Amino acid sequence: MSGTFQRLQESLSAAKEAASETFNDVTTTNEKILDMWPNKVDQTKSGNRMTTDTGVKIQDTDHWLRVVSDKQEGPALLEDQIAREKIMRFDHERIPERVIHARGTGAHGYFKLHTPIPELSSAGVLNDISRTTPVFVRFSTVLGSRGSADTVRDVRGFAVKFYTDEGNWDIVGNNIPVFFIQDAIKFPDVIHAGKPEPHNEVPQAQSAHNNFWDFQYLHSEATHMFMWTMSDRAIPRSYRMMQGFGVNTYTLINAKGGRSFVKFVWTPELGVHSLVWDEALKLAGQDPDFHRKDLQEAIENRAYPKWKFGIQVVSEADQHKFEFDILDATKLWPEDLIPVQYIGELCLNRNVDEFFAETEQVAFCTSHVIPGIGFSDDPLLQGRNFSYFDTQISRLGVNWQQLPINRPIAACPVMNFHRDGQLNHRIHKGTVNYWPNRFENTPHARHTGDTDAYREFSQNVAGIKERLNAPKFKEHFNQAQLFYNSLSPVEKIHMQAAFAFELDHCDDPIVYKRVCERIAEIDLPLAQAVAKLVGGEIPQKAARQNHGRKAPKLSQTEFAPAAPTIASRRIAMIIADGFEMPTFLAVRTALTAEGALTFVIAPRRHMIKPAGSEAGIMADHHLEGMRSTMFDAVFICPGAQSTITLRENGRAVQWVREAFGHLKTIGALGDAVAFLQEAVMLPGVDLAIDRSSSEVVSSYGVVTGWKANVGLLRSLKIEPSKTA
Ligand code: HDE
């Protein structure tokens, strides 16, 4: 008895210790982290002892129990329960990967409200500005398997779980505001068409194949969405630099029971940025974990990513006032018609401790809402509400809500008569497991007077039961055109190249010919340019008039950060033996002071000696190991001897040339400018520098000068969006 009591005391003090545990050097007050603490296993406190799953100490885990003699191995014995347990546990390590969005990464953080909205919603998280609500966010790609590459052309998932004081609320969104289909019953078709083809399981994590584009043509409602997936939005630079959208139409319900329609938006503080396609393709091979590592690295370096949280609201009275149906998920709500009100902030500030237990086991459901938030009759949302709950059961088992990452925080304990099932972890005390029962002190579902319980909106519903959509769902092209018209000229060129790439990978002429015809319904010059490259008839006339309208905030160039920053950007500093140490140090100090992450790249990963000194700098990587694709900007350090070495090094030349081709900011000083000039072979641009001046010149994103000065460093700031 006293031993048990002592253990209880120990676990209590461990929980208290947890409260003051420092994570990323910040003392955590995150209630979700504290809630999960009792489940955490600190391996450093094992006392160096390994045990079986039943807690028995193990003496040897490297040799299977067997019969041996001096001369030869003998048979392994089945009686070795230690070996059997180890192998058996390994055999069952895998669970089914998510049927879509299998590849992803996650992090913990918080949500903070700054503008309460009591007139719209009674939700505590949308009214109480003193709260800091813990969140877990998982970003993902859609089509690829769990081991596929991060930088493929695809939609990105942006799923947020709020652990509120009133229960868990999930916004399971994407980085694109619309979707391919209007009705959830089409979901298996659109996903089957996009996933690898059934006969050969090719291609992996790509929409560039016959079946995907066949489906797109046959479903004109998908046109708007495929314009987005062919845009730069589908190849983000980082999860930290993309928007998130709830996509579906939800509702907000206020304390009086009044309802409004709402869409949710996340907008990143760092602005919206993309890779260029060639870079994305190369990264997929050179660093398949690029986005995962980027998020983890930023959090480790305390460059915590932040997003503004916005809502777009339509009153009940205005539901039918627009030319599109506000319940149609293939349509966005243009911001000039329905402005975004930003009311809060999301910040990610803690990496997971164990990927499987947290990121893989986290389970989002669109049906997870809290009092003050409801659904609409959006037919896609209604289907999603069924699907997520269902899929978690096959992925994680019926008790998936009890898993540490999924359960609600202590402020809202789970109390009901749901019981049993595989891997139930809860032990209920009491003699009844049904409702109503003869006791007063068991969980009650009170029907009246509860202001904090979940209450559905009392909706008046009338109609004929049919397999049909409302009339405005039939219009499919206006917003596809609106999106295209709103893009910058550079974004349009990128889109043309994206279509040309994708359709070139379709070898069935009926597929690429038809898609070109479809594009002609949106924009004739675009369709002509694509058809000229991919084959088939070149469309001669527009299938329909372009309405010529544009909308704000559809081009990602409109999301420049309020204060441009190089914080958390990766900058390669190229040096070779004989480099100028004072310049190197001055530039590195200035970049680090602005929060950039600098990496020294040299012909070899050894000590690189500067001119006139034995004390050198250790290179972080060599030119073959880390390619320019993995960095945002490049600085080439001056030095007479180092410049000669770099000029003769084919990889160094290719490195800089490639960075230039990917539109990266490149800086060079002193003699390194000559190397840069040769490497980029910029016709008509003379990078010759005035040795008498300390000014820098900047053209085509290349910044050169004779000496290091502040102007150069400022110029190194990354532009909001790549243009060329
Ligand atoms: Fe999903 N979706 N989806 N989806 N979805 C899943 O749930 C589904 C849709 C989204 O990081 C699955 O847990 C249907 C739109 C994200 O764990 C599954 C329909 C949007 C994630 C499912 C849609 C999304 C999923 C697979 C059409 C943007 C990853 C694994 C009606 C708003 C969540 C899982 C994570 C995952 C069903 C359409 C976003 C099968 C039926 C629209 C971010 O339940």
Image (spheres, grey):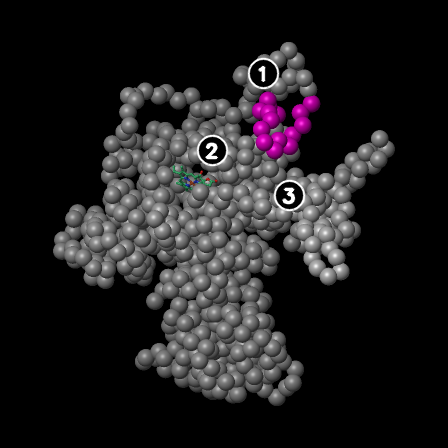
Residue position for label 1: 435
Q: Which residue is mark 2?
A: 390
SS type, badge 3: helix
Check disc 1 and give the amino acid type.
Trp
Q: Secondary structure at mark 1?
A: loop
**Nearer to the camera, 403 or 270:** 403
Mark 2: amino acid: Asp
Front of the two marks 3 and 2 = 2
User: Of circles 1 and 2, which is in front?
Assistant: 2
**Label 2 Cα neighbours within 10 Å, binned few <14 / some 14-19 / many ≥20:** some
| Amino acid type, callout 3 | Ile
Q: Residue furthest top?
A: 438
Q: Which residues are magenta?
A: 415-429
- Work out how far the residue at label 1 is from the one at label 2, CA to CA, in angstroms: 25 Å
Q: Residue furthest right?
A: 2
Evaluate if marks 1 and 3 touch, with contact meaning CB atoms under 8 Å apart: no
Marks 1 and 3: which is nearer the front?
1
Q: Residue at x 79, y 40 (%)?
A: 10
Proximity of marks 3 and 2: CB atoms separated by less than 8 Å = no
Name the secondary structure under disc 2.
helix
Q: Is residue 645 left or right of residue 73?
A: left
Give x and y (percent) for residue 434: 59, 17
Q: Main secondary structure of the magenta part?
A: loop
Which residue matches tag 3? 33
Residue found at x 51% / y 29%: 371
Nearest the eye: 667 or 21: 21
Under 8 Å from ligand 1: the CB of mark 2?
yes
Q: Is residue 209 magenta?
A: no
Q: Please state the horizontal and vertical placement of residue 318, each as a whole percent of the image.
A: 33, 31
Mark 1 crowd level (few <14, some 14–19, many ≥20, 10 Å Cα) = few
